[in-house]
Structures are given as C-alpha cells and as structure tokens.
Image (cartoon, grey):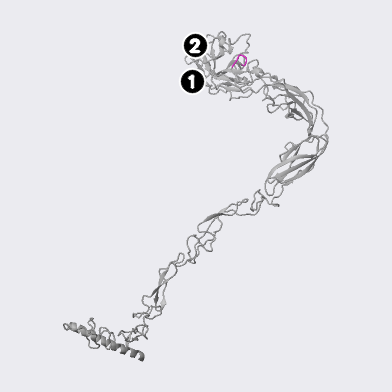
Amino acid sequence: MPPVSARRCHWLLVLVLVASCQCDRGRVQAVEDAGLVCDIEVCGNDRDDDCDGLADEGCPCLKVSDVCECVVGGPAQRCGVDIGACEAGQRYCSLEGRWGSCVGGVGPAVETCNGLDDDCDGANDDELTRPCGTSVGACRPGVEACTDAAWGACVGATAPVPERCDGTLDDDCDGMVDEGCQCREGLAERCGSMTGTCREGSRTCTDAGVWSACEGDVRPAAEVCDRLDNDCNGTADDPGTCLPPVVMCPAALTVVANTPVTLTGAASDPDGTIASTSWTVAARPAGSTATPAAPAARVTGFTPDQAGTFTLSFCATDDHGLSACCTTRLSTTACASPPSPPVSTACGTSWDGRPIVEFAPVPSGLVYELVGPSNAVLATASAGHNHLRPAMRAAVGGPPPGGTPLPLAVRACRASDPTCCSAPASLSVNVVEDCATPTTPTPSNVLISEYVVNGEGSCPSPNCATMDTCQAGEAVEITNLSNCPVTLNGFHFAYRNSTASMASLRWMNFGAADVIPPRGVYVAIRGRPYAPTCSASLGPDSPGLFGLRVSQLAMLGSNLCNGWFNNSGGGQSELRLAPGSIPTGSTPTFAASAAISRIAPYLSASVDCSGIGFDAVDSCGTVMGGNQPNGILAPNQLGRLWHPCDAVTAPVPACVRN
C-alpha cells in the first residue's frame, strides 16, 4: 500500500477527475445519443462524457479498464520468474493505473560459467563461450566453452611458440620480435681464421637464433718446424721449434803433400732437410792455394799442395736456414819426386785421335801418366808397360795430316804416392779430325779395285743362274782415303772385259744410302749366291776405322752368267767409278775423261797389282788373305790405310790397335 499522505492526495485528484469525466461522457453520450451536448467526464459510468473517445479517462482507477492496467490501491501482483537463478518479485499499481516495476525479485543475468541458469532460460551454462588467447604478435584468439561450471580448452587460437629468430614475427607473442636472438635464422657467415695455416670455414644461424659450430675450417695445430705458422699466431716456426743440422767430419789424416784425398762429410736435419753443404779451407800452410774439388758436395776431393797442416771446415744449412759446422785436420809431409821418364817417342800423326807414345818399360814402383793440355791424365802405364794410348779421342784435330799439334807430356809418379811425380817430359802430335760431314768422290779421296772368291766346283758352273759353284763371289771395292765419309750418291761403277763385248757389261747405280766410312771400304757384291758350303763371307758392316760397308744393291748387266771380272785378261778390261746414273735400258759408256777412279788395263808389268783388290784368284793374293790389312796385302789399296803410328814393337800389353 502507498503511504497515507499519498492516498489523501490521490483521492482529491480522483474527485476532480470524476467531475471532468462526467462532463466529457455527457458530451460523448450526447453525440452518441443524437445531438446530446458533451459534458465533463463522469467517473464510474463507463461512458465517454467528454466525447474524447475514452470512458472514465482521468478518473481514479478503481477497476481495470481501457485506461487502467490495475486498480489503484489494489493488491500487489507477482512478477518475474522462478526459473534457474531467477526469483519472482512483486509490482504495485501506480496512481496512474499502471503496474510499477517488479521489486523484491532476482532477474536474469548474463550467463556465467558456474553451473547455474544465470539467464533463467531453463538451461545451465547454455551457449556460454568466451574469447581466449591473444592477438599480440603472431598469436590469434580462439574460443573456449563452459561445461559443468568449468571452462574448456581454447579452440581455434594461435598460441605462442618459442621465438624464431627470423626477423619478421613475434612468435612468443610478448610484444617483441626476435628478443634474445644472436642472429637471424638461415644466415651464414665465415668463421675461423686465415692466419698461418688456418683457414676459414662457415657457420649457420639456427632457428633458435644461435650460431652453429664452425664447419670446414682448419684450426690451429701444434707448431712444427716447416716454415709454416701451424698454431696460427702470426709467426712461422716459433722460437725453439726448429733444430739445427747435425754434422760429422772425417777423422784427422796424415798424407804426403800433393796426394789427393777424399773427404766425406755427413749431415742430417732432425726436423727437415739439408738445403746445402760446403767445404772450405779454414787454415792452410803459407803459399798454399789448394781448394776442395767439389766445395758444395758432401764428398769432395782435396789435394794438399804444401807440407804442413790444413784445417778444412764442413758446414750444412737446413731448409730453415739454420747451420752447423765441423772441422777436419789434414797433416801433410813432403815427397821425394822420382826422376823424369826417359825421352819418349810418339807418332807424328794420329788418325783416330788416340796418339801412341812409346818408351822403355816402366820401372818397378813407378807409374807413367800421359797428360793432356788441361793437365788431365789421358792414360796410365804401370810397371812393365812400354806404351801409352788414350782410351778416348784426345783432341778434335784437323784435316789430314792434322791441325795444330797437340801438346802432351809424360810424367813418372810413385805408385805408393800418386801425388809425388817427376817433372813432365814434353812432346806433341798431329791429330786428324773426326770428320762427320760426307764429301763427294774425287780422284784424291777414293780408289777402286775388285776381287773374286773361289767356289767349290769346276768351271764353268753347270747353271750359273741358279748355282754358281765355280766362283762363289765377285765384288768391287771402293776405298776411302780421307778421314771424312764419302757419299756415292749420284755415281756408278761399270766393268767390261778385254773384248768389250756387250755380254760382259755390268754396273751398279749408287744412292743416298751408299756411303764409304772414313778410311774405310765400300764393297759392291755381284748378285750371286755363294756355293752351299763356301765359308768366305765378308762379315758385317763396321763403320769405325778400317770400316766396312757392304752394298745392299743388286748388280746390273745384260749377262751376269758370263764375263767374270778378269784380273789377267789384259787388253780392254776396265773397271771405273764415274758420276751419273745409267738409265734403265741403257748401257754404260767408258769415256776416260769421266772417270773418278779407273783401272785399265788390269795387269801390266808397271801396275804390279797396285790397282787390284785383295783375295784375287791370280798372283795378287789368295782367298785366305782376309779383309784386315797385314803385310801380305801391301801394296794393294787397303794396305795403304795401315800407318806405322798405329803399331808398337812388342807392345805390353799386347792390344794396341783400335
């Protein structure tokens, strides 16, 4: 109920309103009643007295009507709901006939996750969701739902993750990007050192923002003696790393002055290699000029040239520049020189560059030495020997009879002390050049001759074309009288018998391969086989002194079965060497002016075989004469190649000739 004062005022207002309502209802009713005059509204008659379309408007609400929701002063009305957490309340009718607000109840509230029906819709915690997570950085919010008064998992959210050092996102959603990172993920950089032997590698930034270990780098190592900075401290071969060489010298020696000695130094390096060695004379007797023969070698020769004491130093330097030295003491005494050798004799000309020196046999206890212009020993003769001859050519020489005389000397030395020698006995000899340039044939450098070799059967042969048993061989010799090779290229030889018949003609054209060795013989053999058991062969080529060159050409002619070279035919029998080639199908001419060398006729009292070859069947020799010069062969052409200078009477040792 409203308070009393309020009721009093209310009723006063009701009375006023009733009077007004009656008048109005009268007017309305008058209108409704066909012409009745409208009056003020009369309360309580349910009529529209004031003709405004409302009955009892403005009157106290004593009952529910069109204008009154409730009766003023009537009982309170229950309001609200009793569902869930809600509780019903009450509402009172106002003086205006309107229900007031609901008081004393509990109304719906926002649903919360508490297991109750806060919004009073008959369901507990229904549709109740809330955002979860954060939108900071890379995170995105999700939604969590309430079930049985408890919030469930956050669904659909992007949650924080450990920070990736990628330089773009706040992965852990703390408002900062790449906090705590050393580097950016995926970046690579060089690492390590380039000092000394060290070499840089590379490292990569991981997703945790830290650098990986350095890979592919070469790191410092223990320092060793190798000229390198192994520990990468900027210094190669730190002090104390390298050790000097270890050297050793030979023991002290005592020799006779001018006796050659061999000195051997030893050197090793404990931490490297020996780069160089040297021998030097640290001390010497007055007047000495002796020096080591090979000062840079570990093994050297040394000839003390004075009596006294020598000190020789041997030093070694390793590959790091460190050196070490040692010394050897060499004491020398004077020698008693032997007498000079007896007057020596020598050949005036040496054709092979190896001059022979003759003398009385060498006395016991001595050695004779043949010394050349540069003081080099060319040959040595021991006791009992009676000549000296170099093993190799002693000088280049010149054209026959030789160039500038070669100065030689012979000295006598004691066998027990090769340095104790006599004064030299001097001599000289001409040396003929060792010529290698081919020359062409001339009347002064070639001679021609021929020979035949006996066969086994009777003459004439049954069939000379298939088996010549009468004469097993027939050849032409061209002798080189010079010391240069003679080329026969562009020349030919030709033969005809005493009747000069065409059947007797035979010849051979020479080419570039046909060369006569210096002081040698070229043999052109007729193209016939030897008899089956004939043993008279020529032997192989020998291009040296008295060299032999056998032609590989076939002899040409119209009838090679007849017309043997005839040593005793006389008349027009002729053998000649001439320039030019005989064309195929032609025959040789025998113009005397064209011949380089010529034998015509073969035999006469004045010729006396001097133009005839050896091993002939007639009176100029025998088949057993051989092809080496000897006394029997003089005066034929090969015999002229023999020189008195190339012989020693009763030589010791016996072998003297080349």
Q: Give residue 123's position: percent from left, percent from top.
A: 35, 79
**Element carrying mark 2:** helix
* Residue highlighted by disc 2: 502
Magenta-colored segment: predominant secondary structure: loop
Q: Is residue 620 left or right of residue 265?
A: left
Q: Which quarter of the image is occupied by the C terminus? A: top right
Q: Residue at x 82, y 31 (%)?
A: 337
Which numbered disc covers residue 466?
1
Amino acid type assigned to the residue bearing label 2 in the image: Met
Q: Residue at x 50, y 57 (%)?
A: 186
* Residue 210 against residue 14 in the figure, above or below: above
Which comes before the other along the chain, label 1 or label 2? 1
Q: Which quarter of the image is occupied by the N terminus? A: bottom left
Q: Give residue 273's position: percent from left, percent from top.
A: 67, 46
Q: Are marks 1 and 2 in contact (CB under 8 Å)?
A: no
From the viewer's side, name the closer residue of 548 and 561.
Answer: 548
From the viewer's side, name the closer residue of 376 and 7.
Answer: 7
Amino acid type assigned to the residue bearing label 1 in the image: Thr
Nearer mark to the viewer, of 1 and 2: 2
Outermost residue toward the left?
34
Image quadrant where residue 276 sits: top right
Magenta region: 441-445
Is-magenta flag for residue 333? no
Q: Give residue 141's position: percent from left, percent from top.
A: 42, 68
Q: Give residue 77's position: percent from left, percent from top.
A: 31, 87
Outermost residue toward the front?
37
Regarding residue 195, the answer to whether it shows in the image is yes
**Element carrying mark 1:** loop
* Residue 292 against residue 241 in the figure, above or below: above
